[in-house]
Image (spheres, coloured by chain):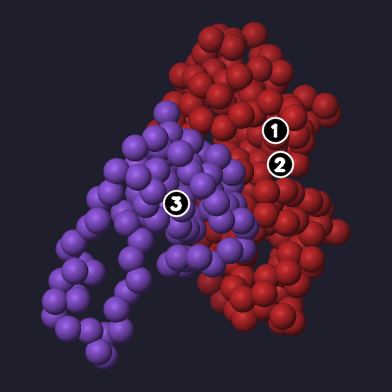
Chain colours: A red, B purple
């Protein structure tokens, strides 16, 4: 069996930032990401994954499950946790067809953390990111800086934090656009991770 | 700004959607005459008033849906609810 391909981030160019550190942008594209799609009666798959459309939940093994679209989920976390979460999904009763696809190399993933993260996002996205409309756990798909993205609110220790996914080919552009949008809020670029 | 009521995502800026044009019933390919096909493919009613039309939520749920919009006032009525298959192409 061939070795798995070495992950290369879509972000190849970063910048020195001089912000206060209250708002942080981190490239976490290396995080394992799987896309699950189901057709027909998708309720059984939704119940198994525990995340209806527009919400997120933590799977038993520690993976994060995002209900990104009707009949569509994104599962992310460590490789083992994601494998545990998607194992056996194809055999779930009720749905006509279920597919699970490793998306790790196809999508860029960024985390934006900080008190001013909602205001920063609202500069480049038309959705309302205030607490009443999008509380912790909310998931939405929308245009961010003219790029179609999946966005999940995943607070870190009470501080607003957002996961932003986009196609890999647009990752560098979106990264640059987010740095530009966060400049006035004192954004700093965190160490890349996953 | 035109707010379009997507049945899955809620009100969205029309720039986040793709306009699919007037919604017509597709004629039966087995029995339709060339004139009927021409009308289906190329002719539009274009009323100044209520019109049933299709939209694609390209930045959100990526689903097609139909809506009734008043082309004179941009008012929407009777928006479909989640799971409603009216006019769905997906």
Q: In the depicted view, which residue is nearer to us: A140 or B44? A: B44
Q: Quadrant of residue A117?
A: top right
Q: Position of residue A81 (x, y in %)?
A: 76, 59
Residue that badge 2 annotates = A138
> Position of B72 compared to A86: left or right?
left
Look at the image and tell me whether residue A149 can be seen: no
- The answer to whether the residue labelled 2 contacts the one labelled 1, judged by CB atoms less than 8 Å apart, is yes
- Of tags 2 and 1, the one toward the viewer is 1
Mark 1, secondary structure of its residue: loop
In the rendered structure, which disc, 2 or 1, sits on the residue that comes first in sequence?
1
At x 43%, y 34%, the residue is B2
Where does residue A137 sit, x and y in percent of width and height?
Answer: 75, 41
Is disc 3 placed on a helix, strand or loop? strand
Q: Chain of mark 3?
A: B
Q: CA distance from mark 2 to mark 1?
A: 9 Å
Q: Which residue is mark 1?
A: A133
Between marks 2 and 3, how big is the CA–CA gap? Answer: 29 Å
Dots 2 and 3: beta carbons under 8 Å? no
Seen in the image, is A27 located left or right of residue B67?
A: right
Q: Is residue A56 left or right of residue A11?
A: right
């Amino acid at each position: 069996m061939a070795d798995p391909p070495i992950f290369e981030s879509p972000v190849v160019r970063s910048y020195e930032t001089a912000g206060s550190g209250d708002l942080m942008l981190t490239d976490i594209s290396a995080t394992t990401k799987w896309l699950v799609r189901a057709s027909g009666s998708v309720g059984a798959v939704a119940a198994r994954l525990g995340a209806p459309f527009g919400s997120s939940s933590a799977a038993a093994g520690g993976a994060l499950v995002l209900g990104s679209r009707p009949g569509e989920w994104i599962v992310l976390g460590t490789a083992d946790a994601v494998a545990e979460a998607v194992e056996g999904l194809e055999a779930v009763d009720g749905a006509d067809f279920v597919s699970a696809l490793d998306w790790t190399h196809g999508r860029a993933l960024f985390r934006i953390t900080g008190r001013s993260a909602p205001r920063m996002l609202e500069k480049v996205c038309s959705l309302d990111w205030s607490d009443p409309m999008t509380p912790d756990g909310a998931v939405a798909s929308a245009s961010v800086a003219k790029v179609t993205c999946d966005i999940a609110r995943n607070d870190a220790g009470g501080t607003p934090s957002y996961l932003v996914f986009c196609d890999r080919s647009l990752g560098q552009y979106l990264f640059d656009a987010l740095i530009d949008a966060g400049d006035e809020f004192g954004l700093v670029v965190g160490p890349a991770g996953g | 700004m035109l707010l379009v009521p997507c049945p899955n995502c809620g009100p969205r800026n029309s720039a986040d959607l793709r306009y699919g044009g007037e919604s017509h019933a597709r004629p039966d390919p087995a029995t339709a005459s060339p004139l009927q096909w021409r009308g289906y493919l190329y002719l539009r009613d274009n009323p100044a008033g209520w019109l049933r039309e299709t939209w694609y939520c390209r930045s959100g749920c990526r689903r097609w849906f139909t809506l009734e919009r008043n082309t004179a006032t941009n008012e929407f009525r009777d928006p479909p609810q989640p799971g409603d298959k009216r006019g769905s192409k997906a």
